[in-house]
Image: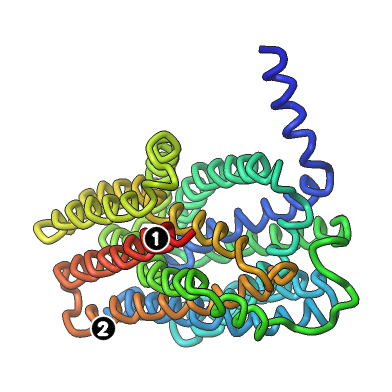
Amino acid sequence: MSNQKQSIAQRFASIGKPYFIFLRMDTCLLAITALLSIFINSFILRASEGSNSGIDTALIYNMVTYGSQPVFMLAAVWVVRKLSPRHSQRIGFLFFALLFLFIIIVGEKAGTDYFLVPAFFRSAGAGFYYVTYSFQIIEYTTDDNRDAASGISGTISSVIALVFPLLSGLFLSAFSGSFTGYRIFFGFLLAITLLAFIFSLKLVPLKSAIDPLDKKTHIKDAFKGLFSVGIGRSILVMTFFKGVRSGAMTFFVELLIFNAIRNESLLGLNSTIGKIAAILGALLYGVIVTPRLRARSVAAASTLIILAAAALFFSSDWIVLIIFSAFNSGLNIFITEPELTLYFTVIGSIDGIKGKAGEVHTVNEIFLAAGEVLGIGLTLVAGILFPGSSIAATAAIVALTASQYFCAGLISSITRKL
């Protein structure tokens, strides 16, 4: 027992101080993204009160956000290579700060007349931040301790997702729909952004993950490296189909719930329930799924979610929606994790893309964004053709989830080739 305890202690100790300095900053971003992904949509619906276009506006907002992020990532790669990774990341902080300041100053119109501005600010912030992030993960962790580091980050992310949305929902509900609550809320996110920037000043400089003398962007090399082999092409197609579901399903069910109840506290409660279900699903996933079962995991989880969604054809009551949301959250890892782990396995086996983490991530993001835009677009079209129809919304959920059967087939094919 003592040897086991010692080996565990040594494993976590091997992570090193540079990672924990980085983790302080990234925890701020985890909080920002967790809260923004939930309450920016409720903000848009609140701003559109009395209008039937609220859901459509939220769908377009998310479509623009996902669709434009790769463009900003291309710009971020240029900044990383020509200047430095820290310049790119701090530009990301600037865009997040501009996003929150814009909403605080403009108020409700930021969710109606000018909703495209927050969409571009958000995608720019994420694009510039995460290109640098991809180099930092490689720099501050090793193959031996990366799983332990991910476990720490995942635990923090779970705590944030369990507590912060519920507390934020209760806070916003206390203002009875007043935009004063949202202004204070986005002011809080602005303060977290400033804190993240301060933490970024303490980061240990990158030394091995990127060559500071290499001023060339390697986007073409990343494309060539991924397209040069069959499994590289297959992984990008899989990423596209992953995006078809992941884009809209990240927020669409929550949109339907909030549209039905118009209560931020219940929206926060739904997030907490969903996270508990996700944690239970993750525990079950770790016990059941092996590399050999990845394709079956995606296919089986997709089938169960489609069967559960069938209940929404008969009732779109908010209670039924929350139950479905929890079920979907619990099974989500059985779809996303096989796709993610296989992605890292494949890109780690392809020659010619080592040292190009930012470029590879950007190429992958282009295919992901294309799928996300398609998925959200199909959902938007269904809503326009059948406005206010729960049947149309449910059909969209079923269609988005059914797209994952393509991923299951691709995972099976790629696994045979490895």
Say which of 404 and 117 sits in front.
404
Q: Secondary structure at mark 1?
A: helix
Q: In the picture provided, is 171 more to the left or to the right than 245?
A: right
Q: In the picture provided, is 271 more to the left or to the right than 14?
A: left
Say which of 175 and 135 sits in front.
135
Q: Is residue 47 visible?
A: no
Q: Residue at x 65, y 58 (%)?
A: 29
Check the image and report above or below for 202 versus 238.
Answer: above
Say which of 82 and 119 sits in front.
82
Question: Which numbered dot is residue 322?
Answer: none
Q: In the picture provided, is 245 more to the left or to the right than 91?
A: left
Instruction: Name the amino acid, label 1.
Output: Ile
Q: Nearer the viewer, mark 2 or mark 1?
A: 1
Q: Residue at x 47, y 69 (%)?
A: 235
Check the image and report above or below for 301 versus 357.
Answer: above
Which x, y percent locates residue 89? 75, 69
Q: Residue at x 37, y 55 (%)?
A: 335
Label 2 vs label 1: CA separation? Answer: 29 Å
The answer to which quarter of the image holds residue 384 is: bottom left
Q: Which residue is mark 1?
A: 411
Q: Residue at x 26, y 61 (%)?
A: 260
Question: Which numbered dot is residue 381?
Answer: 2
